Image (tube, rainbow, N blue to C red):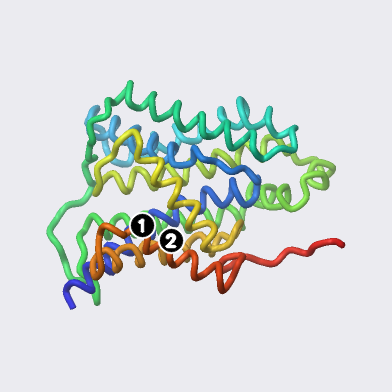
Amino acid sequence: MAELGQYLGNGLTLGCIYALMAIGLTLVFGYMNVVNFAHGEFYMVGAYLAFTITDILGLSFVLGLLAAIVGAIVLGVLVDIGILRKLRQYDDIAMPILATIGLSILLQNLAILIWNPVPKTAGSPVSGSSIDLLVMRTTPQNIFIVVAAAVSVLLAFLFMTRTRAGLKMRATFQDPMASWLMGVNVRRIYAMTFAFGAAMAAIGGVLISTVFQMTPTMGAVATAKSFVVVILGGLGSFPGAILGGLLLGLVESFGAGYLSADYEDAFGLLVLLVVLLLRPRGLFGAPKAVQE
């Protein structure tokens, strides 16, 4: 029973990080129709920026988190204006893919030059030994990650559903031309959406770096997991990203614990395969009307 509680706690922790990553990617992939293979690099950059502020400069964790969010937003805006905006005029999905792959390689190598390739672990704002919480056996660090991720998801949801900026984002991706005719700056909305997705990824990177080591190539695995979660939950679905992230985290944790840690990634892919066989559009994916 103790093992069950520990795997449950670890699975929820991973699931919350996956959900944060997937929410950012589902906005970019599901709404903007950009297959962003550099999404994990915002996760990596966020972790290193927070590490620099908190562990190298000795400032507070809150300042490190804010620095990661601001840095990811600035980088996201620059990427959209400098790269994606120029490619958006071409109706070719391959060009953004190649551009983001190149961006991913560039950011990884810049991280190696700035922070060196030696793995690092950031300090956590909380500490303590394992504790029993209901049916879970977990640590204060994991509880902090779950709570911080839940708050971030809630704030993201409120931003998307309760603010004028969120309304403009949703309206733009439903009908860009109609939004433009109604006076919405569509270019600005695209940049804001990409930056918003980058910020969500950066928060995930900051939180996970408090319990796992960070490396300049950590974004590659995060990108792959994010795509799995987005497809699992349903393209463009906010609830699907949350549920898909939690499901993937729990499956990987229980699979690694009870079966084999060597096949941890394979368990998640197996669940994805089963879900797609039963629901090809994902758990919350809505069917689209097709004109004949």
Q: Is residue 76 left or right of residue 107?
A: right
Residue 105, labelled with which disc? Answer: none
Residues 122 and 244: in front is: 244
The residue where tag 1 is placed is: 265
**CA neighbours of label 2 inside 10 A, class few (<14), some (14 to 19), many (20+):** some
Q: Residue 248 appears at what percent x and percent y?
A: 40, 63
Of the residues shown, which amino acid type is indicated by label 2?
Leu
Residues 194 and 150: in front is 194
Can you tell which quarter of the image residue 96 is in?
Answer: top right
Task: Please state if 270 lies on the left or on the right of 117 as rendered.
Answer: right
At 56% across and 27% down in the image, what residue appears? 78
Check disc 2 and report the residue beneath it.
Answer: 269
Where the N terminus falls, by quadrant? Answer: bottom left
| Tag 1–tag 2 contact (CB < 8 Å) | yes
CA separation, marks 1 and 2? Answer: 7 Å
Circle 2: element type = helix
At horizontal 53% and vertical 48% (from top left) the residue drawn is 25
Q: Is residue 279 above or below residue 69?
A: below
Which residue appears at 44% of the width and 41% of the height?
40
Residue at image x 50%, y 52%? 227
Number of numbered callouts drawn:
2
Quadrant in which the C terminus appears: bottom right
Vertical side of 181 occupied by 262: above or below: below
Q: Residues within 10 Å of mark 1 (few under 14, many from 20)?
A: some
Residue 113, given in percent of the width and then of the height, sits at 33, 21
133 vs 194, left or right, is left
Disc 1 residue type (three-letter): Asp
- Which type of secondary structure does the marked residue at label 1 adopt? helix
